[in-house]
């Protein structure tokens, strides 16, 4: 018989020194103002638009979202459109009670009950409410539009986001806009894209009409369309007459590059091109006129270009497919542009349908080395960005595809006046300055986000003479001084991995900070290979770190063509490490390392090979909501008895449902793991079976076996907010009281998924490493328990 679930008891704390009578008067007045504003709009536009009543409620404490929504707001005819990230702050609600009458009535009863001598307070959830109010038009304007507001009546392209209401309500409002503004010379919707998480329009309109549209409560946000910005680069002439180029194998996996297109007849890259298509209508040609896409594609196909040049041989690992969404802006040489009439999100959806739905392409990796500099996580918004949210939705729809996203770049010269300021504040500014946080779409939860670290210096002969005048901001293997940093949404570790993407080597002259353009950059392919033999150019950025990780993912996919994205990402993460810990000085505390370097630099060889002193065990499966699994292994005595450094590592990857409306928990469920020693799995199962995971605290502290838990880094609170988790424990000697078995407890906490039968796909791996040669592989193989496979 199925046990009947009890509703969770929720505590709401009364605010200190609240005058409930004044609180009630103030918010009744606020509600009346909202209603009056709504009535005016409804009356003014009744012939065109059936406007909705949408407002914001300020929450003063973290509350249980389900209870607050279901037991309180719903009783007043309110529906939550957005929950703030920490469950406090401003929530956005839609009200079917267009007079807010029930809200006002219950507010009065709350005030009366607080004044009575009775211990029972009616509508205690009002304790958590600070205020209710309208959303003023100025709060809906994005950073680009604030910086460059419309000043005349010239029709201008803009992005317009609407609150994600019911489909019928949303459709009615969009149709109403078209009916109200029926002059295409002054207002036109050139594109619209609606998903489960967001509703976006690309409009072309005037200042007068925009000012009017911003009054509508359905409007969440408006801004100018984003544009990409690229660095100036250096070209070099290279003789490639003696270079050998090997194409991918016929059955190699495909890597899709969404960028500015490619030069398909490039004398080296051309050997790896599978197909190319154009998704913008400004430039009719499909080839790359910007140069960015060709550079990214070359790194995805060949990996380290400089190493290939040194070896005089290019071996393409995978077939490259190109989707062109950018064109060259001739009026601004440093800028590329997106199609003015198309939403970037809609283009991405079309690309995915065209490329990923074609089985002959065998695409396993999608690289997105683009970002919106005006959408900085935590600075311009704590709300998941539509493009990042869309990538997550696509990743859920295509669980066999790995998505790779660059973290984004920021120039410290824009924030410091002198070279000494930059050098003194590195690396602190990367994590302390909000302008250096990751940008859209690097906040995508299901993508691997890639940051950059500094390569070895490349100094020209002329530069070497005055080397003492040039100052590299970062040392070799330290975070690049331009690489954007985490954390991401809900505190996720972002970027998860790093690759070599360049450095900044600077000097000060006449009160100006100058860059050594060649010394700080990495080699990439040029999009002008037939211009005096300029096959190679030098550039820097996380844009070029990301495709190197895509190259590793593609090579893993060649070996495991049927593998899931969870499997491939797990191998990438378990292979990652910090390449040189000696350069991570006292300035690099744990939090700085996680925010700048994630879990480290991945290695293809480490990802796919075990060795005599390094063993990888892996399990892929499904787990139900509020359930747990136990994986157990007898560790050979030689692992701890043999002197030398040893390491235990666990990696967990999974692909949960996401919801952009839930800022408190973007992920629908949360997988966590704990590692124990010296406790039999049957005893662990008995202990965890007694825990009600539906009511459990996030930490799930279990006192009686706490002493047997292996404390790993990062700690569970830091790592478990992400769907890409890694933790390790290093030993220099045998720990006291440690004995077999070693057990991993994997548990699945439900956050907001309503389907009780939902099963979560996951991939979990355990790695044992020893510095000495002890034939660990065979020892572990013989010790594996047959009754519990990992």
Image: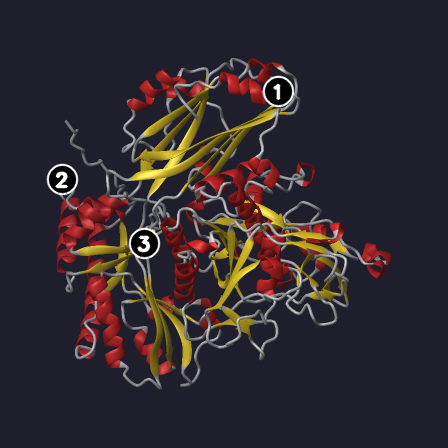
Q: Helix, strand, or loop for circle 1?
A: loop
In percent of the image, x 40 and y 68: which residue is there? 343
The residues bearing labels 3 and 1 have C-alpha atoms spaced at a distance of 51 Å
The residue where tag 3 is placed is 661
The residue located at (52%, 38%) in the rendering is 571
Q: Are marks 1 and 2 in contact (CB under 8 Å)?
A: no
Residue 533, numbered label? none
State the separation of the CA atoms marked 1 and 2. 75 Å
Classify residue 222 by image quadrant: bottom left
| Residue 383 seen in the current view | no
Residue 312 visible at all: yes
> In the image, is residue 282 above or below residue 688?
below
The residue closer to the viewer here, 340 or 396, is 396
Label 2, on which residue?
A: 117
For this view, does 613 lie left or right of residue 188?
right
Please, what secondary structure does the residue beneath circle 3 have?
loop
The residue pinned by badge 1 equals: 775
Circle 3 residues within 10 Å: few <14, some 14–19, many ≥20: many
């Amino acid at each position: 018989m199925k046990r009947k679930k009890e509703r969770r008891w929720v505590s709401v704390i009364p605010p200190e020194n609240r005058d409930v009578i004044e609180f009630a008067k103030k918010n009744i007045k606020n509600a009346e103002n909202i209603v009056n504003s709504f009535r005016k709009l409804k009356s003014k536009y009744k012939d065109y638009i059936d406007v909705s009543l949408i407002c914001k409620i300020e929450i003063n404490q973290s509350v249980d979202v389900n209870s607050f929504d279901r037991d309180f707001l719903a009783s007043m005819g309110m529906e939550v459109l957005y929950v703030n990230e920490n469950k406090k702050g401003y929530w956005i609600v839609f009200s079917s009670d267009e007079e807010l009458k029930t809200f006002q009535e219950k507010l009065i009863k709350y005030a009366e009950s607080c004044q009575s001598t009775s211990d029972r307070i009616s509508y205690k959830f009002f304790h958590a409410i600070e205020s209710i109010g309208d959303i003023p038009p100025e709060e809906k304007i994005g950073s680009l539009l604030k910086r460059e507001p419309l000043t005349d009546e010239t029709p201008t392209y803009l992005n317009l986001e609407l609150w994600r209401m019911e489909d019928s309500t949303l459709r009615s409002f969009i149709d109403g806009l078209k009916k109200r503004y029926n002059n295409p010379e002054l207002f036109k919707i050139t594109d619209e894209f609606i998903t489960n998480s967001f509703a976006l329009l690309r409009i072309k309109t005037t200042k007068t009409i925009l000012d009017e549209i911003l009054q509508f409560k359905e409007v969440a946000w408006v801004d100018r369309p984003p544009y990409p910005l690229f660095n100036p680069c250096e070209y070099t002439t290279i003789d490639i007459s003696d270079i050998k180029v090997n194409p991918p194998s016929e059955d190699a996996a495909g890597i899709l590059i969404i960028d500015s297109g490619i030069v398909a007849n490039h004398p080296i890259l051309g050997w790896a091109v599978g197909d190319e298509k154009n998704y913008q209508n400004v430039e009719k040609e499909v080839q790359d006129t910007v140069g960015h896409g060709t550079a990214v594609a070359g790194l995805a196909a060949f990996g380290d270009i400089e190493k290939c040049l040194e070896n005089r041989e290019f071996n393409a690992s995978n077939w490259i497919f190109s989707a062109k969404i950018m064109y060259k802006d001739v009026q601004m040489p440093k800028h590329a542009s997106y199609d003015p009439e198309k939403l970037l999100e809609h283009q991405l959806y079309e690309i995915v349908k065209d490329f990923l739905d074609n089985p002959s392409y065998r695409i396993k990796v999608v690289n997105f080395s683009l970002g919106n500099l005006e959408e900085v996580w935590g600075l311009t918004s704590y709300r998941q960005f539509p493009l990042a949210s869309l990538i997550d939705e696509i990743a859920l729809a295509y669980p066999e595809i790995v998505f790779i996203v660059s973290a984004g770049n920021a120039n410290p010269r824009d924030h410091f006046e002198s070279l000494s300021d930059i050098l003194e504040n590195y690396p602190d500014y990367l994590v302390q300055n909000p302008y250096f946080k990751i940008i859209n779409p690097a906040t995508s939860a299901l993508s691997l986000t890639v940051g950059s670290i500094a390569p070895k210096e490349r100094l020209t002969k002329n530069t070497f003479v005055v080397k003492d005048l040039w100052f590299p901001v970062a040392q070799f293997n330290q975070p690049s001084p331009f690489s954007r940093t985490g954390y991401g949404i809900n505190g996720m570790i972002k970027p998860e991995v790093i690759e070599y993407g360049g450095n900044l080597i600077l000097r000060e002259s006449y009160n100006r900070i100058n860059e050594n353009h060649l010394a700080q950059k990495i080699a990439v392919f040029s999009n002008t290979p037939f211009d005096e033999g300029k096959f190679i150019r030098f550039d820097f950025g996380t844009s070029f770190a990301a495709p190197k990780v895509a190259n590793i993912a593609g090579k893993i996919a060649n070996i495991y063509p049927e593998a899931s994205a969870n499997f491939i990402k797990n191998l990438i993460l378990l292979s990652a490490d910090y390449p040189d810990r000696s350069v991570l000085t006292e300035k690099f505390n744990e939090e700085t390392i996680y925010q700048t370097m994630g879990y480290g630099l991945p290695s293809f060889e480490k990802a796919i090979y075990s060795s005599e002193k390094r063993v990888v065990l892996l399990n892929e499966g499904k787990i139900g909501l509020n359930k747990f699994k136990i994986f157990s292994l007898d560790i050979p005595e030689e692992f701890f008895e043999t002197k030398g450094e040893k390491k235990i590592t666990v990696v967990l990857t999974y692909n949960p449902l996401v919801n952009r409306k839930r800022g408190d928990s973007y992920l629908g469920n949360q997988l966590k793991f704990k590692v124990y020693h010296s406790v039999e799995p049957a005893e662990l199962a008995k202990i965890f079976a007694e825990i009600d995971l539906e009511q459990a605290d996030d930490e799930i502290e279990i006192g009686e076996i706490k002493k047997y838990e292996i404390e790993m880094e990062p700690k569970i609170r830091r790592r478990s907010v992400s769907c890409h988790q890694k933790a390790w424990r290093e030993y220099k000697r045998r720990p006291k009281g440690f004995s077999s078995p070693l057990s991993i407890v994997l548990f699945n906490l439900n956050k907001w998924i309503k389907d009780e039968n939902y099963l979560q796909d996951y991939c979990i791996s355990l790695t044992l490493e020893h510095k000495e040669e002890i034939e660990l592989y065979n020892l572990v193989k013989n010790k594996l328990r047959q009754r519990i496979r990992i």
